[in-house]
Amino acid sequence: MDSLEATLRQLREAFNTGRTRPAEFRVAQLQSLGRFLRDNRQLLQDALAEDLRKSVFESEVSEIAISQAEVDLALRSLRSWMKDKRVRKNLATQLDSAFIRKEPLGLVLIIAPWNYPLNLMLVPLVGAIAAGNCVVLKPSEASKSIEKVLAEVLPRYLDQSCFAVVLGGPQETGQLLEHRFDYIFFTGNPQVGKIVMAAAAKHLTPITLELGGKNPCYVDDNCDPQTVANRVAWFRYFNAGQTCVAPDYILCSQEMQERLLPALQSAILRFYGDDPKTSPNLGRVINQKHFKRLQGLLDCGRVAIGGQSDESDLYIAPTVLVDVQEMEPVMQEEIFGPILPLLTVRSLDEAIDFINRREKPLALYAFSKRSQVVKEVLARTSSGGFCGNDGFMHMTLSSLPFGGVGNSGMGSYHGKFSFDTFSHHRACLLRSPRMEKINDLRYPPYSPRNLRV
Ligand code: NAD
């Protein structure tokens, strides 16, 4: 038996003993996960800086603190989440007990990408632990420093008979996916999502797919350009643009474009200074492959702001493109880097048509001082999540489900939604053994009398 098979067998056996089911076990593992985050804060910040040149601020708000907040919420809420939910009964079951029990699914696999390599591994893990599962964690091979911390340090904090980290790239992940899991939670791009879904289908394994895509951002004429520019520049260039919910492109009128450009220039200058390359606040592209892909996209349309790059430093300046054609590569693929194309439209209807001609995005943004405009974009489009007059703030609320729709994914998580994702909602009815006489009504031989209920 190879070592992967042995690991999976051991995890399954541990699950079958029932060890992960008691609330006390789940609480202990979650507390330990919290300790992992607190004890290793500096190590994690350093690893995120090595992988993506993440600033301490960005590491804190988008990786460490957000994971800690999920741990804390699960610890506060676990016992109420785990409680059986009583449901309404009909006449025939009045004397019985009817409820939904949240049961662990068994052995689950979590596959994470590299852009928020800690958050996108630990936040689903919190849900999987809270729901009482055993877990295999597969971090991304591209974010090597975090992969190392997850492989070498995290296991010291968790019960190793129930939780294991498996390393590798596409080939090893392919081998892992040949095995049977009770749930697969995948975050990554839609092409790989299809591979994961096909592998899961062989075992009829249910899945969550947290995928990417091109997130539109509509800017109405009735906006303060500087406010829009500040908000858009912040969430477009956060993590060097490598964010699944970042706005991928802006749709606005020609007049708004003229007003937005100087405002974007001023926001970029304020955030990253005269020479963004020397700014401690701007991240780097993850690797050479993505750098080359992004460099190619700089040839689309016309560079209005930025455009500089340095391969030796994996640096791409915060860039704005204008005069971009719909058929150019920058409008065909998810950008996933610090490049923002502006496309002009003549009306709100044209913007909505443009959005609806494309795959359903993970996030959609609309800016306007007129709430009617924001509500109209919301009503006439579809996306995983929506935020009016800002970007990605909707996903800071664990009271909202986070997930895609259509090409941007299926299923959702965060807060209680994570617990529900990793639980089976078992329909239970405990019948009374008494009052057998009433059942005569349902037994054959049938006669019109049976229907008189
Ligand atoms: P990716 O799909 O290339 O990799 C994700 C994981 O899949 C990694 O662990 C990788 O090892 C594995 N993998 C890659 N190729 C594989 C293959 N052929 N077979 C089996 N496994 C394979 O994604 P990425 O480049 O790491 O991340 C970027 C993508 O993830 C973007 O599309 C982005 O939008 C998306 N994303 C989505 C969310 C979300 O929450 N919806 C969050 C972050 C990133």
Image (tube, grey):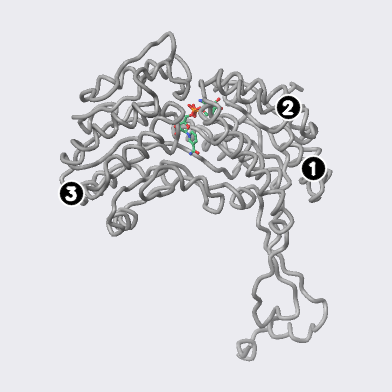
Q: Marks 2 and 3, Cα distance to the nearest angstrom?
A: 58 Å
Q: Residue 5 got which mark? A: 2
Q: Residues within 10 Å of mark 2 (few under 14, many from 20)?
A: few
Q: In which quarter of the image is residue 231?
A: top left
Report the amino acid beneath label 1.
Ala
Q: Marks 1 and 2, Cα distance to the nearest angstrom?
A: 27 Å
In the rendered image, which residue does mark 1 sit on?
Answer: 28
Query: In the image, is residue 363 above or below residue 174?
Result: below
Residue at the location (58% across, 35% down)? 119
Residue 80 screen position, x and y as percent: 71, 59
In the rendered image, which residue does mark 3 sit on?
Answer: 347
Query: In the image, is residue 63 above or below residue 302?
Result: below
Looking at the image, residue 101 sits to the left or right of residue 392; the answer is right
Foreground: disc 1 or disc 2 = 1
Which of 35/112 is in front? 35
Label 1 vs 2, first from the N-terminus: 2
Report the amino acid beneath label 3.
Ser
Q: How crowded is mark 1: few (under 14 residues within 10 Å), some or many (20 or more)?
A: some
Report the amino acid beneath label 2.
Glu
Query: In the image, is residue 27 above or below residue 371?
Result: above
Looking at the image, residue 250 sits to the left or right of residue 143; the answer is left
Foreground: disc 2 or disc 3 = 3
* Quarter of the rendering occupied by the C terminus: bottom right
Q: Farthest residue to the top: give it.
A: 312
What kind of element bears circle 2? helix
* Quarter of the rendering occupied by the N terminus: top right
Residue at the location (61% across, 27% down)? 139
Q: Residue 159 got which mark? A: none
